[in-house]
């Protein structure tokens, strides 16, 4: 079987490009395992803006970089950002040419966030979309903890004028969400892993067929295990991105409460993935007129996988404060390590763990309940350890690599069988 992936990362092709990928480690894990199947041949399409690169092959996998150059010159870049332009149908001829060259038996598109899914109505090849997140819902939850007026009030004027920053990012996001809804309408087959993404698929594509399939984690997380609490002081770790809806402000609010009422616990909160000087950090500090460092919150910036595991193995708790998420890999990684977790009850997260059995769930944007949950676990170390043990057991079953490969292959076969009854697409006309 020949399968063509459309992904937002070069995956294992990054080595050829001498690039460091950000995110997508679970896709690399899936590629590593699925390419070991003798009768499956994989092609991977991804966008690559650094330079124009011809298709290349590593072992049996063919990689297709799609070059998307940015405007050159300071003024042109500013005007481009102010237009809030997104890729729409202009890449479809490129995608169709790749499909024609590779001649796949099936197309697997990872995510509805990019323009890849627009090719589905234009090809007769069976297609399935793997739901990663959902921009339509995320755009509704964008200003959950920080308002639009907060963004305008606390953003730097130079950032706004140059078309950069969170305000402009949201304008692009809304356009991408509109494009995403068209992608859902044009696709017959979806795969996901939570009740949340299944219900979203039903809502946006009422006649679509949904397959449940879990995701792999980065290989290093299968090989390590959290042990126990430290004796003298306590460390909390969080992995977060620069998205406004990830709940960074809740960390500051919660830590202030901890410092005011429970200073005897000597809690250090380490936040990986974001650093001092990032726009979101500056915005939160400006809004609250407080500094993260004044509350013993250490912003670690981006970490490689080994650095992140080291921080997690030496922590006491993992906190996930997001206002919306599907199945955040950071939370799943903490669970498979066996690190006790507290997370917001948001999006698909309730499908990942059972409250008070495999972790604790609290309302998003509620620093008081989050503070209380933290103190509960710091006071009852045995309970916290039991949550971590149960979480590891559940995550180990959920992320079992062989089970995932078996599910993917069965899904591919089933989609091909079902696609034989679908009407052929109209020929694509490139105006």
Image: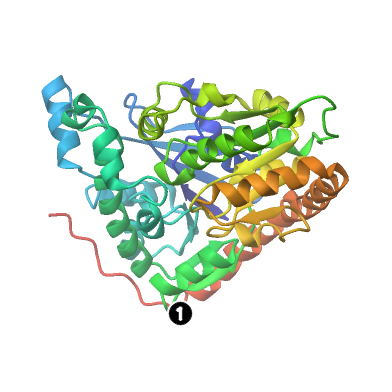
Q: Is residue 308 above or below residue 108?
A: above
| Quarter that holds the C terminus | bottom left
Q: Which of 414 and 22 is in front in this view?
A: 22
Q: Is residue 53 above or below residue 151?
A: above
Instruction: Kindly identify the residue that appears in the image at 63 percent across and 42 percent down.
Output: 319
Q: Which of 20 and 409 is in front in this view?
A: 20
Q: Residue 392 appears at what percent x and percent y?
A: 79, 48
Identify the residue position indicated by label 1 in the image.
Answer: 421
Q: In this view, does 51 lie above or below 327?
A: above
Instruction: Kindly identify the residue that appears in the image at 50 percent across and 31 percent down.
Output: 22
Q: Residue 207 appears at what percent x and percent y?
A: 43, 79
Instruction: Kindly identify the residue that appears in the image at 78 percent across and 58 percent down.
Output: 357
| SS of the residue under disc 1 | loop
Direction from residue 46 to residue 317 in the image, left or right = right
Extreme front residue here?
261
Q: Nearer the viewer, residue 187 or 245?
A: 245
Does the rendering let one see residue 216? no
Mark 1 Cα-neighbour bin, 10 Å: few <14, some 14–19, many ≥20? few
Q: In this view, does 30 lie above or below 158?
A: below
Q: Residue 48 appears at what percent x and percent y?
A: 37, 32
């Amino acid at each position: 079987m020949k399968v063509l992936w459309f992904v937002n990362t070069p995956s294992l092709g990054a080595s050829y490009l001498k690039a460091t990928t950000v995110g997508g480690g679970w896709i690399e894990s899936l590629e590593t395992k699925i390419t070991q199947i003798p009768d499956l041949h994989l092609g991977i399409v991804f966008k690559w803006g650094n330079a124009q690169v011809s298709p290349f092959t590593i072992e049996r996998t063919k990689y297709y970089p799609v070059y998307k150059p940015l405007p050159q010159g300071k003024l042109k870049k500013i005007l481009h950002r102010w237009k809030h332009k997104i890729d729409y149908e202009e890449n479809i001829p490129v995608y169709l040419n790749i499909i024609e060259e590779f001649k796949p038996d099936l197309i697997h598109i990872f995510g509805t966030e990019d323009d890849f899914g627009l090719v589905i109505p234009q090809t007769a090849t069976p297609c399935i979309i793997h739901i990663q997140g959902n921009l339509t819902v995320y755009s509704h939850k964008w200003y959950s903890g920080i308002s639009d007026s907060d963004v305008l009030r606390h953003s730097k004027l130079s950032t706004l004028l140059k078309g950069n920053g969170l305000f402009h990012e949201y304008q692009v996001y809304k356009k991408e969400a509109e494009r995403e809804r068209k992608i859902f309408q044009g696709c017959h087959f979806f795969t996901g892993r939570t009740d949340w993404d299944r219900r979203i698929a039903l809502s946006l594509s009422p006649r679509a067929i949904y397959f449940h399939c879990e995701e792999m984690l980065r290989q290093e997380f299968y090989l390590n295990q959290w042990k126990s609490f430290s004796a003298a002081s306590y460390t909390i770790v969080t992995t977060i991105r620069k998205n406004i809806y990830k709940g960074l402000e809740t960390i500051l609010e919660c830590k202030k409460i901890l410092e005011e009422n429970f200073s005897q616990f000597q809690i250090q909160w380490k936040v990986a993935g974001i650093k001092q000087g990032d726009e979101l950090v500056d915005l939160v500090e400006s809004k609250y007129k407080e500094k993260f460092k004044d509350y013993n919150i250490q912003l670690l910036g981006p970490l490689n996988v080994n650095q992140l595991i080291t921080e997690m193995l030496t922590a006491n708790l993992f906190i996930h404060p997001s206002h919306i998420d599907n199945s955040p890999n950071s939370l799943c990684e903490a669970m498979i390590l066996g690190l006790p977790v507290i997370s917001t009850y948001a999006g698909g997260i309730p499908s990942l763990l059972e409250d008070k059995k495999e972790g604790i769930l609290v309302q998003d944007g509620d620093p008081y309940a989050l503070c209380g949950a933290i103190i509960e676990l710091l006071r009852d170390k045995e309970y916290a350890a039991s949550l971590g043990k149960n979480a590891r057991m559940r995550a180990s079953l959920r992320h079992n690599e062989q089970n995932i490969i078996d599910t993917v292959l069965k899904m591919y076969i089933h989609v091909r069988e079902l696609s034989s009854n679908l009407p052929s697409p109209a020929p694509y006309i490139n105006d």
